[in-house]
Image: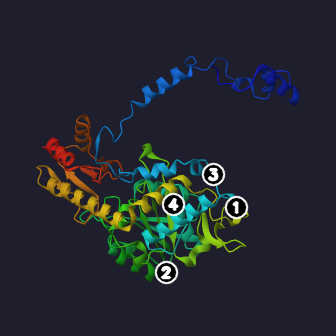
Amino acid sequence: MPYVPHTDAEIKAMLRAIGVNSVEELFNVIPEELRLKKALNLPPGLSEQELVAEMKKLGARNATVDDHISFIGAGAYNHYIPSVVNHILLRSEFYTSYTPYQPEISQGTLQAIFEYQTLICQLTGMDVANASMYEGASATAEAILMARRINNRKKVVVSSALHPEYRDVVRTYLKTQPVVIEEIMHCNETGKTLPEAVERHIDEETSCLVIQQPNFFGCLEDLKSLGELARKNGALLVVVVSEPISLGMLKPPGEFGADIVAGEGQSLGNSLSFGGPYLGFFAIREKYLRQMPGRLVGETTDREGNRGFILTLSTREQHIRREKATSNICTNEGLCALAATVYLTSLGKGGIMELARLNLSKAEYLKRALQGKKGVRPAFSAPTFNEFAIEVDRNPGELLKTLSVKGIWGGISLKRFYPHLDKHILLCVTEMNTKKEMDRLLDVLS
C-alpha cells in the first residue's frame, strides 16, 4: 500500500490551480545539476503487517535496563515509575493537549501545571517556578542568560564539576554573547568545587556562579560557603540539580540563598526513553519574576467567584514583541511536567524522603563494598548521594566492556569528559538496584 494521500485526479487539480501542467514543470526552478537523476536507494514498500514486524525486529536490537543490570547515571536515572503515572498521563484530556492559550477550555491542563509549579517550589525551596522547560542543560543556559539580564555583568563562573554536556550547551547558548566563561577546576582529592578556588575567580564583574548539587561526580558541594562568596561580590548563585530525588534528603538550594535553581526532572516519573523527551525545571526568587523565561500559570477567580487558572506571564515571542522576550527558544514540556506532578503527588513528602534514603543506603553499600576490592579505590573523599566515582587499576573501557558481556552496565568512563581521569568510572545506584545485582557486580569484578 503506497503512503501517498493524493489521487492522480487530485494532483492534476492542484497543478491546474497553480498554473503548471506537471510535477516536473513545478520543479523547473531547481537547477538541473542539483536534481536527483535516479531513484532513491530504498527497499521495496511493505504492507502494514510486514512493517510492524520489521519495526519489532529492529526494536529488539535495543538494549535496555529491562535486560541489563545498570549502574549508569550521569544525568539520566533509572527510577521506578508508579503505574498511576501513566494511567493519568495517557488520558486523552492530557496527552492530546498542546498549549493552554485558551483558559476557558484548558482548566485541567492549567491546574496541572499550577500544581507542578507548586511542587517544584516546595522541592527547591524557591518562591516561583515556571511551567517547565525543554531539559536540564538548556534550563541551565537559560538561567545564566537570566542572570545577565538582571545584573548586566560580563563574566560567568562555572564549576568544572557541572555536567560536561550542560557546559557544552552553555557555551553554545553564549557563543554570540559578550560573555567570558571561566571554569573552576574541581579538587582532585575531594571531587568538590573549593571555595578558595571560587574566590580567586569571582569578582564584581561576575554575573553568576553556577554550581551543580550533587555535582557530576555525585559529590555534595558546600553551597553555604559558595553562596556567601557569590553574594559578597554581588553575583547570583545558580544551582543546578540533575538528580532531584536527592532533594528528598538534602537541604533545598533555596535555603542556601540560591537565586535561580535549574535542573533535570527526568527522575520524577519520566522514563529513560533512550535520552528524551526530558523535563527542565526552573525556579527563582520572586523579585526576579519579570526576567524568568518560559510561561507561568497563576490562580485567579472568574466573574462568578469560582477558582480558576490562567497563563499569568508568558514572556515568549508568541505573546510579546520579540525583542522583549526573555527567551525565543524555550517552551514547557507539558506532558513530562504532568508526569512529575503525578509522581510527586503519589509519593508525597514522606515517600520522597524514604526514596532518597533508600537511594543513599544502597549506594553506600556498594561504595563500601568496592573499597574492599583489589585494584579499586574511591576517587574522591566528599560525601555522595546515589552516585560516586571509583579509580581502577585496569583500563576502564576494557573493564566496562567485560561487564557488559556479563549483562552489567557498570557505569561510564570519566575519561570521555575529563582526560586526566583516565582510570575513573562513575557509578550510580538507585532503588532499582537490588543487593543481588550489586553483589553480582562485585563478583564479576573479582
The Cα–Cα distance between marks 1 and 3, rounded to whole angstroms, is: 14 Å
Residue 46: x, y in percent?
A: 56, 19
The Cα–Cα distance between marks 2 and 1, rounded to whole angstroms, is: 43 Å
Q: Is residue 149 left or right of residue 346?
A: right
Marks 4, 1: nearer the viewer: 1
Tag 2 or tag 3, which sits nearer the N-term?
Answer: 3
Residue 400: x, y in percent?
A: 25, 41
Q: Kindly check if marks 2 and 4 are in contact, taking CB atoms under 8 A apart as contact.
A: no
Compared to 311, does 444 lie above or below? Answer: above
The Cα–Cα distance between marks 2 and 4, rounded to whole angstroms, is: 22 Å
Q: Is residue 266 left or right of residue 18?
A: left
Q: How many marks can you see?
A: 4
Marks 1, 3: nearer the viewer: 1
Please tell me the numbered disc located at residue 98.
3
Q: Kindly check if marks 4 and 1 are in contact, taking CB atoms under 8 A apart as contact.
A: no
> Residue under circle 1?
104
Tag 3 or tag 4, which sits nearer the N-term?
Answer: 3
Q: Quadrant of the C terminus?
A: top left
Residue 52: x, y in percent?
A: 50, 26
Per the image, label 2 sits on a secondary structure element best described as loop
Q: Amino acid at mark 1?
A: Glu
Per the image, label 4 sits on a secondary structure element best described as helix
Please tell me the numbered disc located at residue 234.
2
Badge 3 crowding class, 10 Å Cα cut-off, few under 14, some 14 to 19, many 20 or more, is: few
The Cα–Cα distance between marks 4 and 3, rounded to whole angstroms, is: 20 Å
Residue plotted at (55% across, 18% down): 43
Compared to 128, does 427 lie above or below? Answer: above
Badge 2 crowding class, 10 Å Cα cut-off, few under 14, some 14 to 19, many 20 or more, is: some
Per the image, label 3 sits on a secondary structure element best described as loop
The Cα–Cα distance between marks 4 and 1, rounded to whole angstroms, is: 30 Å
> Residue under circle 4?
139
Tag 3 or tag 1, which sits nearer the N-term?
Answer: 3
